[in-house]
Amino acid sequence: MTTNHEARNYFQLHVDHSQTHKKHDEVQHEKQSQKSQEPSRNVQNEKRTVKEILKDTFRQLAVSFVILVIGVVLINFQAYSQIAKSKWQDFFGTQEVSPLEEIVRPQNDIKYTKTVLKTSNNPEVQKKQIPALNLEVAPSDNRIIIPRINQNIPIVRVDSESLIKRDWGALEKDMQEALRGGVVHYPGTSLPGQSGNIAITGHSSYFPWDPGRFKDVFALLHKVVEGDHIVIYWDQKKYVYEVNKITIVLPDDIEILKQTPTDKLTLITCTPVGTNLKRLIVEAVPVKVEELDAVVR
């Protein structure tokens, strides 16, 4: 026969078991409730993540752009510094006249006067009394002079063998090596004194680690205007050209290298400075040829 104490224990166990089931049901219900809420939370998290991704992407693009600009400026610093200096001088009106202007100055502008020199019998005194002779002599190498941008540059010739063989890779290599020594006469085009098109190319900017000294000789070529004079010294002769056309073309435009029935000079460089996107073309026509005294070598 069950005692009262045993009955109480049985009742207590039954109650505890019921409460345990109740708590278990509550936990399961809470878990199901949480699961039902997870999709909406995930949607909110996805929305926040998309926004964050867009912000991060924009931030990375902005940083990349800044790094790219800094890199381009550093690589082309020498050329850009020339351009900045030129713009500064133009803005404040401090641009100086290049001494090279004297070379292209028409002889009609030079006035001559006859004077009788009174000299001493002392040879040492005579050296100071007799002025230097105003004679123009040809340089020892072939050169191009562009007073507008204050450039006096050697002209380097490239062998035509690669051009004849149509080995464009070798020709490009020969051209790049020659550009270290100045501007380059494009093989296959005319030479000064010959009829047709004379094509000369030069760097507007190039890699700063390249050993060449003429990496940015045409950085200011865009400042040349129609009517400017350009001088070429070639084989002890002085050829004067007058700029009559300035254009910008695509890199694959080979019309600029073709022979023409009329004589002309074609200068070629990359533009904008620091890029290889297009070509700046300056064309000039011959206006004068002068025989010069050979320089003493």
Image (cartoon, rainbow, N blue to C red):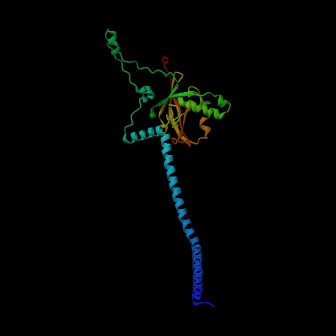
x and y percentages locating residue 201 in the rendered image: 55, 34
Q: Is residue 247 above or below residue 183?
A: below
x and y percentages locating residue 111 in the rendered image: 38, 24
Foreground of the two, 246 or 106? 246
- State which quadrant residue 176 falls in: top right
The residue located at (50%, 44%) in the rendering is: 71
Residue at the right extreme, as displayed: 165
x and y percentages locating residue 46 in the rendered image: 56, 65
User: Quick one: quadrant of the N terminus?
Assistant: bottom right
Foreground of the two, 117 or 276? 276
Q: Is residue 37 visible?
A: yes
Q: How many marks?
A: 0
Q: Is residue 64 above or below residue 161?
A: below
Residue at the top extreme, as displayed: 121
Foreground of the two, 169 or 15? 15
The residue located at (55%, 70%) in the rendering is: 41
Q: Is residue 224 above or below residue 102?
A: below
- State which quadrant residue 269 falls in: top right
Q: Is residue 198 visible?
A: no
- State which quadrant residue 156 falls in: top right
